[in-house]
Image (cartoon, grey):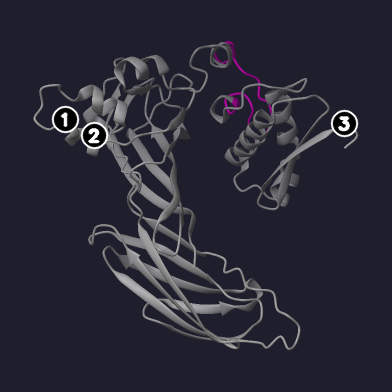
Amino acid sequence: MARTSFFHVKRGNVWICAVTRQNVNAAMVFEFLKRFADTMQSYFGKLNEENVKNNFVLIYELLDEILDFGYPQNTDPGVLKTFITQQGVRTATKEEQSQITSQVTGQIGWRREGIKYRRNELFLDVIEYVNLLMNQQGQVLSAHVAGKVAMKSYLSGMPECKFGINDKITIEGKSKPGSDDPNKANRAAVAIDDCQFHQCVKLTKFETEHAISFIPPDGEYELMRYRTTKDIQLPFRVIPLVREVSRNKMEVKVVVKSNFKPSLLAQKIEVRIPTPPNTSGVQLICMKGKAKYKAGENAIVWKIKRMAGMKESQISAEIDLLSTGNVEKKKWNRPPVSMNFEVPFAPSGLKVRYLKVFEPKLNYSDHDVIKWVRYIGRSGLYETRC
């Protein structure tokens, strides 16, 4: 508009907008807006209209620090919190000023020195979003997993962490050429198509040692993002059956089968079955959970709280249709059946092989650190054509 470009993202009920008249990198602008929103959330929690009004001075101060003449600067909340407080800028001592300078301009700008905790803890979450498009015959048309490794570190001093996963490069490098079954290791390996690391990761060590080595930021952060397209374990199979009984009646049956270990439990399961726009009424019978027809969304929503592995459940529906008279009706194109869920494993098969912590200066070892590892698999766009 008038040679001006507008970029915007939405967080809750707040729109964050950037404006430029130059030919800038759009991905960089959206990344900056995302980081700016994350920085504000780290300062005053939920991002909403009331919090923005109450913290207007703080937001103005943050913008003044992270953006100079339209060029993004340091957006790391850990560094910003050392000299920007919620009460305003405080007078720093000479030691604090030198510490801030070394953080902003030094090699380890994401972590300050002198951090101490009574108990050293490390939390690691492998969170994956599985996306699927399947046809009526059960053939997979497209499938991929978008994952991330999110961490929370509460460690004293300036520790170095080593983190290993069962990616294909690492496993192939570890396997011995004279082994009896060279394909055994490859079956357990994950072929990562592409990955992106946090700035704290030492990329040279990853290329030479095939290990993710890093000095962790304090608190919560995202260590890496990755994407896989091969050997994905699909948690659920959806089998939809649609039969048009007459012009005014349709029968729908949907079977959901879980495809994981019986000892595991899936949660927050929701199946959305589309209905024609001229639906007048729906009679539902489901084996498990609760189902409801939502006329405003032209869909049957079937919710199941929990479902164990290697189980199946089904729902049947009789749909009454309104007669359109002599006017030629437009044929219903049958949108796909979509599904939402959460499972306690990684559908890509990614596993944490080891997680070690080294801190030579302080008197604690890897065994003194309490480590927590959790796997979460969630649905992305999980659809089956009917």
Q: Which residue is mark 1?
A: 182
State the SS at label 1: helix
Label number found at residue 3: 3
* Callout 2 touching callout 1 (CB < 8 Å): yes
State the SS at label 2: helix
Q: Which residue is mark 2?
A: 186
- For residue 294, above or below residue 100: below
Q: Residue at 31% x, 61% y: name it.
A: 265
Q: Tell me how far mark 2 sits from mark 1, CA to CA.
A: 7 Å
Which stretch appears magenta?
A: 80-97
Q: Earlier in the sequence, mark 1 or mark 3?
A: 3
Looking at the rendered structure, the kind of residue marked 3 is: Arg
**Disc 1 vs disc 3: which is toward the camera?**
1
Assess whether residue 82 is covered by the magenta stretch.
yes
One can see residue 326 in this view: yes
Looking at the rendered structure, the kind of residue marked 1 is: Pro
Question: Residue 60's x, y, as percent?
Answer: 75, 32
One can see residue 365 in this view: no
Q: Tell me how far mark 1 sits from mark 3, CA to CA.
A: 59 Å
